[in-house]
Amino acid sequence: MSEVNDYRANLAICQCMAAKSFDALERRSWLDMAESWRLLIICREELPLGENTASVAPTPTAAGI
């Protein structure tokens, strides 16, 4: 299974857990995690094969910390 497919599976699990949650705070946590997986999928699909994500990620600055 490819890395992106693993991310999609994790996204689906988070969405399912959010739908089953009775607590609003827990549901929000699952949806936040789902959004993180979705953004990883988008980032991974936009990068050319073999390109390292660390080389394109922004570097934190002293002002940004």
Image: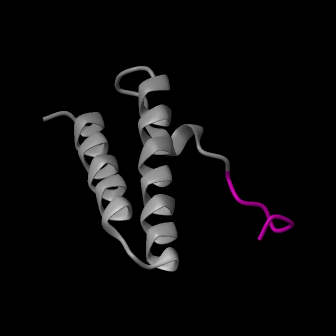
Q: Quadrant of the N terminus?
A: top left
Q: Quadrant of the C terminus?
A: bottom right
Image check: 23 left or right of 1? Answer: right
Q: From this view, report whether residue 60 is shown above or below residue 52.
A: below
Q: Quadrant of residue 38?
A: top left
Stretch in magenta:
59-65
Camera-nearest residue between 20 and 65: 20
Q: Is residue 2 above or below residue 46?
A: below
Q: Nearer the viewer, residue 62 or 10?
A: 10
Q: Which residue reaches farthest left?
A: 1
Position of residue 62 in the picture relative to residue 55 (left or right): right
Point 36% across, 59% down: residue = 19
Q: How far across and how far down the image is residue 52, in percent? A: 43, 36
Quarter of the view holding residue 49: top left
Whether residue 25 sits left or right of residue 16 in the image: it is right
Type of secondary structure dominating the magenta stretch: loop
Give the colour scheme shown: one colour
Would you identify the image quadrant in which residue 60 lies? bottom right
